[in-house]
Amino acid sequence: MLAVITGASSGIGRELALRLAERKYDLVLIARRTERLLEISKLLRNVNIKVEILSLDLTNLDECKILLNTFKNRNIDLFVNNAGFGLYGASLDNDTAKEFQMLDLNIKTVHYLTKEISKIMSRGTIINISSMAAFLPTPLLASYAASKSYVYNYSMALAYEFKQNKVPINIMTVCPGPVKTEFNEVANANPKMKGLSVEKCVESILKGLDKNKILVIPSFKMKFLRFMLRFGPTKLLLKVSYKIQSKK
Ligand SMILES: NC(=O)c1ccc[n+]([C@@H]2O[C@H](COP(=O)([O-])OP(=O)(O)OC[C@H]3O[C@@H](n4cnc5c(N)ncnc54)[C@H](OP(=O)(O)O)[C@@H]3O)[C@@H](O)[C@H]2O)c1
């Protein structure tokens, strides 16, 4: 079995790689930081699986094409669109070029790879990592939250289309709340909310994979929060969300 993971050099992607290796998946690990990918491949050298690394910047469409060309005529069982990052700050202060880079990676790349990999895969699962932010307009993380709403809505709709059209690929959307990874450092955020461990987050993802779920929300707390969000008036939700985000 072959699993391909984007953003495998740290956090959720790295942990997922280690856990899938235990399940004897061969792995293709993708990210920009080659040395980090090499470190994971070294860690796995005594496990009887194949590990390939691809150092690619997936904000770049040509590099996404390199990824796709690598898999022509190969069977992929699991593809994980995990690479992504956030950008914390008042929207008017955020650098537009950096925002566009984030939107390229979080939206365009996920869209493009989901679609093109679906054409290559004959069966299996595509996991798209969205966020709890998908369910809530989030001041001070405005464009990031909006990008994750795209991932959620696109992936859920595609999962339904595939089932209707009998495409034998399950699209599984994952919406984690805060998870202890390098995410906050990269986003320049420092939320007061305690994050879930990356191990627990990945455990939920793997349970979802085993059950062929279309939506996974790691942790009971976040599932409950998602339920409550349905009833909160938007004005109040925005106020609470702003308060949480501004506690830096
Ligand atoms: N942590 C959280 O609180 C949280 C909550 C909800 C959702 N998420 C989502 O979970 C996913 C994984 O994030 P994480 O928390 O594990 O954060 P992380 O530790 O910062 O990992 C992000 C991964 O994405 C890769 N990446 C970033 N830019 C890239 C690019 N241009 N091309 C290729 N790879 C790139 C990074 O590798 P390189 O830097 O080596 O390229 C890294 O491997 C993201 O989509 C994030 O939005 C995270």
Image (cartoon, rainbow, N blue to C red):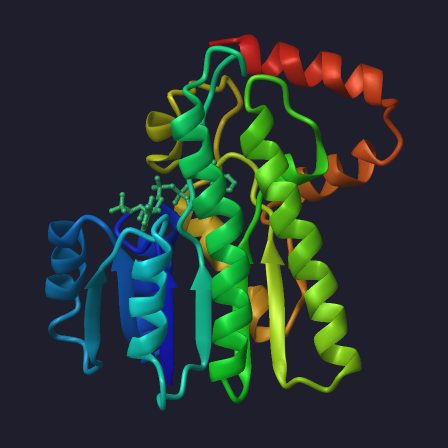
| Front one among 15 and 121 | 121
Residue 192 vs 14, above or below: the answer is above
Residue 134 vs 165, above or below: the answer is above
| Front one among 21 and 127 | 127
223 lies left or right of 49: right
Residue 119 vs 171, above or below: the answer is below
Q: Which quarter of the rendered picture does the N terminus lie within?
A: bottom left
Residue 91 visible in the snapshot: yes
Question: Which quadrant does ligand 1 occupy?
Answer: top left
Q: How many marks?
A: 0
Q: Could you tell me which residue is drawn at 32 percent across and 60 percent down?
A: 62
Q: Could you tell me which residue is drawn at 48 percent across and 15 percent down?
A: 89
Give the image location of residue 153, x and y in percent.
71, 52
| Front one among 116 and 8 | 116
The quarter of the displayed image where residue 185 is located: top left
Residue 217 visible in the snapshot: no
Q: Could you tell me which residue is drawn at 63 percent across and 35 percent down?
A: 146
Give the image location of residue 203, x and y in percent.
48, 58
The quarter of the displayed image where residue 133 is located: top right
